[in-house]
């Protein structure tokens, strides 16, 4: 076992018994939601995964270790902590080496999951190509990680604060399949649809698991995006969210917000401008992704036996 990994007892036992494990990121706890809803949501998502036959592994950087699965106490402490570093690929070695507390992004969670032999990862939405990237060169490290790390990411598409067309182009160039789960088009996080078609459609977890297993059996390196639309009851009207995002982007530019601070700023601003509706949507879509992700993990474990 990698010397930098610390598996929770639940995860360790699951792996010894050959049970499917689903990775969860921790940036959504530290940077994505306010306390106590962040901890409540994290616990609810973990329980959904257990209820669907898999074992959750929330990943974070604590005490010089990559924690694969957090205890209740660690989760609570993490949810209340201030100044927690946001960890991507470039930050991981330094934060582990210096013993700092870090919350894993999609990219870092994929790396850590891969180190622990976990192939399925549930999150809210992936990062992507930011609007104006043709001059800013602001492209999320999530996309590069999807190109080279063998982990499937179950999400509600890419956040609609991004340039979705360029994000799909980037994924195509890198050979990353985008599988729509019961959808023909890319969901845009708060909304169920966008104008961009997915590469393939799958209507059941068995099909997704078969595609993933075949991809890796063929030696095709990299992950996959499984795009699962937000439940209809919690989706936000497309015109409404587009106007809110435009206003949030204008304020970000006015305040010279850039780099890794952009997404947390925009999400907080969108929550403020929607009167909290976006936070409710965020929670609903993550819980739905947990359900679908656990089902896929169970089917994938059967195929990889």
Image (spheres, rainbow, N blue to C red):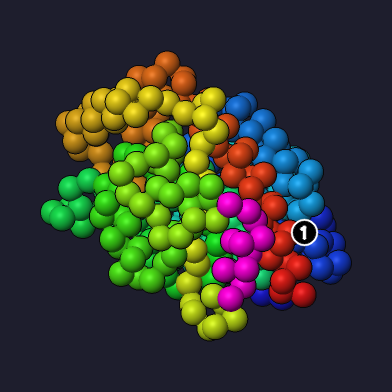
Q: Is residue 226 left or right of residue 258?
A: right
> For the residue carrying disc 1, how many other residues have a C-alpha within 10 Å: few (<14), some (14-19), or many (20+)?
many
Quadrant housing the N terminus: bottom right
Q: What is the number of callouts on the image?
A: 1
Q: Quadrant of residue 167?
A: bottom left
Return the residue nearer the eye: 93 or 9: 9
Is residue 34 shown in magenta?
A: no
Residue 99 in sight from this viewpoint: no
- Can you name the residue that lies furthest to the left here? 135
The image quadrant that residue 304 belongs to is bottom right
Q: Which residue lies at the image location 41% right of the left edge and 60% below the top edge?
A: 199
Residue 236 can be seen in this image = yes
Point out residue 5 in the picture as x, y percentages from the top left corner: 67, 66
Q: Kindly give the residue lying farthest to the top in the view shown.
A: 275
Residue 146: name its quadrant. Answer: bottom left
- Would you name the residue on which mark 1 appears? 11
Q: Residue at x 42, y 67 (%)?
A: 176
- Secondary structure type for disc 1: helix
The percent coordinates of residue 268 (x first, y second) are: 40, 29
Using residue 144 as the reference point, say whether residue 73 is left or right of it.
right
Magenta segment, principal secondary structure? helix
The region drawn magenta spans 203-214
Residue 210 within the magenta-colored segment of the rendering: yes
| Quadrant, the C terminus | bottom right
């Amino acid at each position: 076992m990698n010397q930098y990994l610390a598996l929770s007892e639940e995860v360790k036992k699951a792996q010894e018994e050959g049970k499917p494990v689903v990775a969860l990121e921790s940036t959504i706890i530290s940077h994505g939601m306010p306390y106590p809803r962040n901890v409540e949501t994290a616990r609810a998502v973990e329980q959904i995964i257990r209820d669907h036959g898999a074992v959750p592994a929330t990943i974070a950087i604590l005490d010089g270790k990559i924690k694969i699965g957090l205890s209740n106490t660690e989760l609570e402490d993490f949810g209340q902590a201030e100044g927690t570093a946001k960890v991507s690929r470039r930050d991981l070695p330094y934060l582990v080496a210096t013993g700092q507390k870090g919350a894993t992004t999609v990219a870092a969670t994929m790396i850590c999951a891969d180190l622990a032999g976990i192939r399925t990862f549930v999150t809210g939405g992936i990062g992507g190509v930011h609007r104006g990237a043709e001059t800013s060169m602001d492209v999320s490290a999530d996309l590069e990680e999807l190109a080279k790390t063998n982990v499937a990411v179950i999400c509600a598409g890419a956040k609609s604060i991004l340039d979705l067309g360029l994000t799909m182009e980037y994924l195509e160039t890198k050979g990353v399949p985008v599988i729509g789960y019961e959808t023909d088009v890319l969901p845009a996080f708060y909304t169920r649809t966008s104008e961009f078609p997915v590469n393939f459609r799958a209507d059941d977890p068995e099909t997704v698991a078969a595609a993933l297993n075949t991809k890796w059996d063929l030696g095709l390196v990299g992950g996959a995006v499984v795009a699962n639309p937000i439940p209809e009851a919690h989706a936000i009207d497309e015109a409404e969210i587009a106007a809110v995002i435009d206003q949030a982007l204008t304020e970000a530019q006015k305040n010279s917000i850039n780099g890794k601070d952009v997404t947390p700023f925009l999400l907080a601003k969108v929550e403020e401008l929607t009167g909290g509706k976006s936070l409710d949507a965020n929670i609903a879509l993550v819980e739905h992704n947990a359900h679908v992700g656990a089902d896929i993990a169970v089917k994938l474990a059967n195929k990889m036996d």
